[in-house]
């Protein structure tokens, strides 16, 4: 009970700090941008971990990220849809690819699933690279609409230009996603997914339908990942295949989830909020050519000393 109360107090304090620190630093655009993207990657990591909760390890979530990005970008570029409408509708492309994923990969487990998911990223990437009339191929799309102006309580916030407002949007997104994942983990469905992760044979023996439950987790994960991709391209105002279908995009949620702790609903967010700002503000200036390699060192150290992630270690302490 004491540990649970300590954990709740820590989470409330961290959430309040995330909401109020911009008031102490009203002119810090770089920090708004970096922490805003950390929240976006935190949402991506939560989406990835929703699928991983079932015992599946994906190395191909860049496919869902990229399809959500392109789905939103194409609706914006060719049809001039409202930005938030494209962010909601565009990721249906990710959902469609997720359906194909569940059909063709439903029997794969472990390293075989990992390798197949890694290869799957190339399918939409090659199609988009070569469909010049629709996607402009490897050149990508530029001049995409930025996030719109939002009116709330009589005040207006330009989410495309005001980095502080953009940060709060992405913070609300990651917190809402974290609450959703927490509810899933504590539900009967969440227990079924964890049963599959711990011992699939025993879970199936007590009546859990492995393929169906894992497919539901994958589809939810795919759509949430697509939303992240859609928001990402409207933050940047451009999209190209090498940007959104990269191994980097697939690796980051895995890294953040392992570092933060996959068994805690807030673990992936914790990993993203700690590692991404460190990489952008410290590692990149110190090691401009090899800063991404620091992630490899972090993962090795985490596996050796905190195999359940720092959130579990912190609770245990």
Image: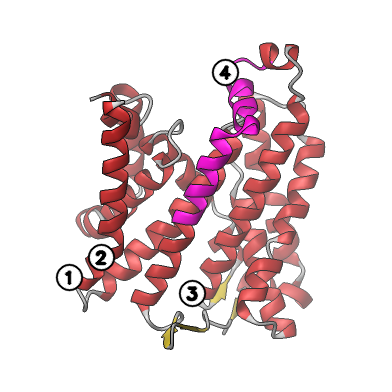
Q: Nearer the viewer, mark 4 or mark 1?
A: 1
Q: From the top left corner, tell me how far across and down residue 250 is, in percent.
A: 53, 47
The residue that disc 4 covers is: 198
Q: Nearer the viewer, residue 151 or 216?
A: 151
What's drawn in magenta, residue-wise?
Answer: 175-200
* 60 relative to 143, above or below: above
Where disc 1 sits, the SS reads helix
The residue that disc 1 covers is: 24
Residues under labels 3 and 1: Cα distance? Answer: 27 Å
Report if the CB atoms under discs 1 and 2 are less than 8 Å apart. yes
**What residue is at 67 percent from the left and 60 percent from the top?**
67
Left or right: 118 as drawn, with respect to 15: right
In which quadrant will I find the C terminus? top left
Residues under labels 4 and 2: Cα distance? Answer: 39 Å
Left or right: 249 as drawn, with respect to 4: right
Q: Nearer the viewer, residue 212 or 236?
A: 212
């Amino acid at each position: 009970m004491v540990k649970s109360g300590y954990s709740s107090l820590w989470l409330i304090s961290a959430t309040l700090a995330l909401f109020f620190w911009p008031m102490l630093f009203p002119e810090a655009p770089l920090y708004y941008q970096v922490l805003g993207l950390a929240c976006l990657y935190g949402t991506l990591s939560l989406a990835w971990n929703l699928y991983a909760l079932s015992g599946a390890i994906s190395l191909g979530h860049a496919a869902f990220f990229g399809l959500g990005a392109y789905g939103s970008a194409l609706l914006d570029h060719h049809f001039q849809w409202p930005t938030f409408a494209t962010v909601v509708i565009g990721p249906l492309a990710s959902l469609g690819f997720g359906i194909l994923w569940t059909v063709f990969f439903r029997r794969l487990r472990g390293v075989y699933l990992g390798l197949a998911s890694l290869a799957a990223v190339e399918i939409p990437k090659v199609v988009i690279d070569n469909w010049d009339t629709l996607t402009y191929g490897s050149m990508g799309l530029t001049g995409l609409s930025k996030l719109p102006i939002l009116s709330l309580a009589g005040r207006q916030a330009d989410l495309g230009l005001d980095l502080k407002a953009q940060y709060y949007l992405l913070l609300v997104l990651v917190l809402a996603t974290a609450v959703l994942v927490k509810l899933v983990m504590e539900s009967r469905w969440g227990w079924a997914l964890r049963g599959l992760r711990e011992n699939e044979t025993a879970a199936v023996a007590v009546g859990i339908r492995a393929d169906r439950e894992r497919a539901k987790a994958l589809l939810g994960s795919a759509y949430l990942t697509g939303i992240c991709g859609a928001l990402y391209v409207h933050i940047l105002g451009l999209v190209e295949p090498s940007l959104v279908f990269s191994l980097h995009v697939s690796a980051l949620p895995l890294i953040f989830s392992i570092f933060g702790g996959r068994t805690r609903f807030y673990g992936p967010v914790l990993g993203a909020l700690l590692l991404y700002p460190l990489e952008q503000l410290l590692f990149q200036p110190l090691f401009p050519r090899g800063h991404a390699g620091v992630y490899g060192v972090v993962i090795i150290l985490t596996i050796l000393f905190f195999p359940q992630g720092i959130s579990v270690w912190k609770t245990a302490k």
